[in-house]
Amino acid sequence: MQKNRSFLLHLSCIVLILYGCSLDYRSANIPEEMAENLPETVFVQFSRIIVRDGKIKTKLEAERAENFTKKKQMVLSNIRFFEYDENEKLLTEGTADKAVLYTETDDVDIFGNIYLYSVPEKTAIYAETLYWKDKEEKLSAAPDDRVRVKEDEGSSIEGRGFNSDFKLREIVFANGVSGVFIQSKEE
């Protein structure tokens, strides 16, 4: 009987202690502004391939991709990009340290050690920051950012206020332009 009382007394103490304790999960909730800055998913060795009419159109590879669904953004690190024509022949390739892909529009802000190369134009673009507007097919830089365009044949032009219209195959610099233009015999 003494053992039963002792057991009941211990059990009663445990129940009272547990009853007096409450687990407050409210403090573990992440504030909404912080939640927006935390990715919903993180991918390592990420690859995104867009296929049209059964053929690869673009391929994007990144060491890391962070998806922010609410912001409709994907942040990519250490990127490689490839664009192909209708016969899956390489048109454009590029690399960069970081990019922000706006998933609703496919616009992209590109940052750090940017290298883009157009195979048909035999031309490379070097920059630290570029902005791609997908619908308009325009590539631009901030007005004060320096961009260099270099052709395989030796011409090299750099300047500030870079804008390029891929539909018109046109490149414009607003100021600070310098470089060397080499005219080929065909021209």
Image (tube, rainbow, N blue to C red):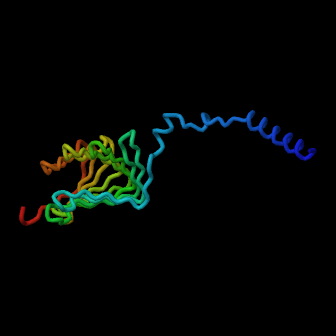
84 or 67: nearer the viewer:
67
16 left or right of 27 in image:
right
State the image quarter where residue 152 is shown.
Answer: bottom left
Give the position of the C terminus as an image quadrant: bottom left
Residue under the image location 27 percent in, 48 percent down? 159
* Residue 123 visible (yes or no): no
Instruction: Where is residue 114? Give x, y as percent.
Output: 33, 55
In the displayed structure, 64 sits above or below 32; it is: below
94 or 185: nearer the viewer:
94
Instruction: Where is residue 108? Give x, y as percent.
Output: 31, 47
117 left or right of 80 in image:
left
Instruction: Where is residue 134? Give x, y as percent.
Output: 23, 46
Residue under the image location 29 percent in, 42 percent down? 104
Q: How many marks?
A: 0
Residue under the image location 33 percent in, 42 percent down? 144
139 or 136: nearer the viewer:
136
Residue under the image location 20 percent in, 61 percent down? 84
Instruction: Where is residue 150? Give x, y as percent.
Output: 24, 59
Residue sitting farthest toward the front = 1
